[in-house]
Amino acid sequence: MQKKYFLVIIPWLEDGGSEHLLYDVMTEFIKKYRIIIVLTEKSNNPLFSKFEKLTNCILDFSSLKNPKEFGKNISALIKLLSIEIILTSNSQISYEASEYFKGTVPIRRYDILHNNSQEGHIKKAISTSKHITKHIVVDSHIKSSLLSSKVDKKKIVDINNAVSPNLFFKLDRLAIGEKKKELKIKENYFVLGFIGRASHEKRPLLFLQEFYKLSKIKRVHAIILSSGPLEKLMLKYIKNKKIEKNITWLKPTCRENLVYIYNVLDILVNSSYIEGQPLTLIEAHMCGIPFLSFNVGGISKMTDGKDSLLLSKDESLFKKLSEICDDPKIVCKMKKELLLNFRTKKLAYATMISKYKKALI
């Protein structure tokens, strides 16, 4: 029996959490469907070769800026291949073109929302809800925002993010020690991590500013794995403050290599002011590494307060990091908690995939 087609519409194949999440989900669906991916924004698409493992049909529609024209081209694709299922994520033009999506049979349209920021896509998702079969939300804050805007609760599916335990796990001490030597991290230095896009909402410069102050009074080293619009500004700051020896700057790498990066950290720092349930924090937990984050989006649901730390928007990142450096027992206790809860976190991935299958099929 020939597989049916499954259409995915996304902006690009950047090296981001939402793209990796989509890849994990789509890996399960290639068993039943032939996947077509439509890209709507210009990009170098660093994950193109990764997604080619799922499908040889990746179409660039980034030149179609008019919603009506975009919608008609999507409709032509839908009718040509008898597509019944569309999955969208982070695509502005998909919302704007919703009314033009037509097929020869009823279309089931699913849309993933990663946060409820007013700077994001939630307004468009609400205004075009009548064209969407199900809103898939990664945390309850997004669900609450949709409900408060009178979106039918039957149209909302709550699916928490998770990562594969086959990719992220705790390494033994010997492997961690060897990796620290490779990264030129001095012995007995407290290691902080910043892993994320170099963009304004992630506030990488705040991380650097607080790290610079910390480096003046503590033995600390930072691992930064980042790229994006603020990258040059970050590198300039590091050079001006003369803290190059205290920082290992890494370019984004394949996901399989990240396990070695997480494992050398003492704590992962998230300075973002907009989040849903960031995969980086989940990945760190799977490697037995706690995080320190501002309490935004759905992050409060990712820790019980024993295995990681949350800051209110007014709290000082520098002050909290200083306290952690002064008392090694704080991190030690959090790491022990993560080991105790590893089985529960491991099962979360299977639960997430199961919910996506139930929602989309």
Image (cartoon, grey):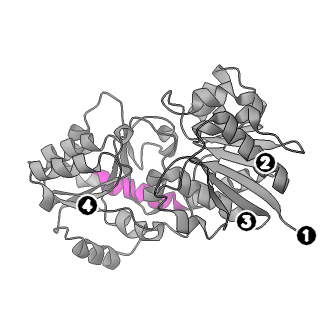
Quadrant in the rendering for residue 250: bottom left
- Residue 272 in percent (x, y) is at 37, 40
Q: Is residue 335 magenta?
A: yes
| Mark 3 surroundings: few (<14), some (14-19) or many (≥20) residues within 10 A | some
- Residue 92 in percent (x, y) is at 58, 37
Badge 3 element: loop
- Marker disc for residue 249: 4
The residues tagged by marks 4 and 1 sit, at their Cα atoms, a distance apart of 50 Å
The residues tagged by marks 3 and 4 sit, at their Cα atoms, a distance apart of 36 Å
The residues tagged by marks 1 and 3 sit, at their Cα atoms, a distance apart of 14 Å
Residue that appears at 66% across and 53% down: 352
Q: Is residue 337 left or right of residue 90?
A: left
Badge 2 element: helix
- Marker disc for residue 1: 1
Q: Earlier in the sequence, mark 2 or mark 3?
A: 3
- Residue 338 in percent (x, y) is at 45, 57
- Residue 255 in percent (x, y) is at 47, 66
Q: Is residue 223 left or right of residue 348?
A: left
Q: Give the foreground label among 2 and 4.
A: 2
The residues tagged by marks 2 and 3 sit, at their Cα atoms, a distance apart of 23 Å
The residues tagged by marks 2 and 1 sit, at their Cα atoms, a distance apart of 24 Å
Amino acid type for the residue under numbered disc 1: Met
Amino acid type for the residue under numbered disc 4: Trp
